Amino acid sequence: MNISFIGGGVMAEAIIGGILGANIASHENIRVGEPSEKRQAHLAETYGIDIHSRNQEVVDNADIIVLSVKPQSLSEVMADIKPALKSNQAVLSIVAGAKTETLSTGLDHASIIRVMPNTPAQIGAGMTVWTALPAVTKDTITTSRNILSTLGE
């Protein structure tokens, strides 16, 4: 399972830590697109994962793409990755306030998982609500459930 993150902030880091801790994916199967050199260095050093400054570089070969950017960056990020998305990839979004319709339309993509984690998720004690559009495969739903369970309930 190849999992890529668009944005390497605190909540993305919590999910990365959960994925690695639960052996859902290995270090070699996680990539992050993150513009901040400071965050790039921190994530690479802490988790031994592949970090890139350009989002397109992490979209290729990903099974699940986690959108973990600030809401004000969403339009720009969607325009950036839209041409690189493939129909067999799922997009899991933790972007605050981003509706599934906004994501599906903005990405011209049907396989969308909308996630609403809360702050305690950063220490594995959160409550996460999520939903998946009908195009998301059963295998991806199972993997998403496993990933999200590392954040709490």
Image: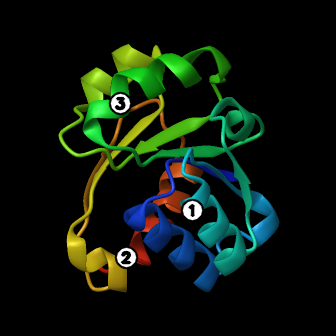
Mark 3 burial class by Cα count in 10 Å: few <14, some 14-19, many 20+? some
The image's mark for residue 151 is: 2
What is the CA distance from the residue labelled 1 to the residue labelled 2?
Answer: 24 Å
Task: Tell me where residue 94 appears, x and y as whole percent.
Answer: 34, 50
Does label 1 or label 3 sit earlier along the sequence? 1
Q: Secondary structure at mark 3?
A: helix
Mark found first going from the N terminus, 1 or 2? 1
Q: CA distance from mark 3 to mark 2?
A: 23 Å
Image location of residue 3, percent across then percent down? 65, 53
Q: Are marks 1 and 2 in contact (CB under 8 Å)?
A: no
User: Is residue 153 visible to us here?
Assistant: no
The one nearer the camera, 150 or 142, is 150
Q: CA distance from mark 1 to mark 3?
A: 21 Å
In terms of image quadrants, where is residue 17? bottom right
- Circle 3 residue: 74
Q: Nearer the viewer, mark 1 or mark 2?
A: 1
Q: Residue at x 27, y 22 (%)?
A: 102
Mark seen at residue 38: 1
N-terminal-most mark, 3 or 2:
3
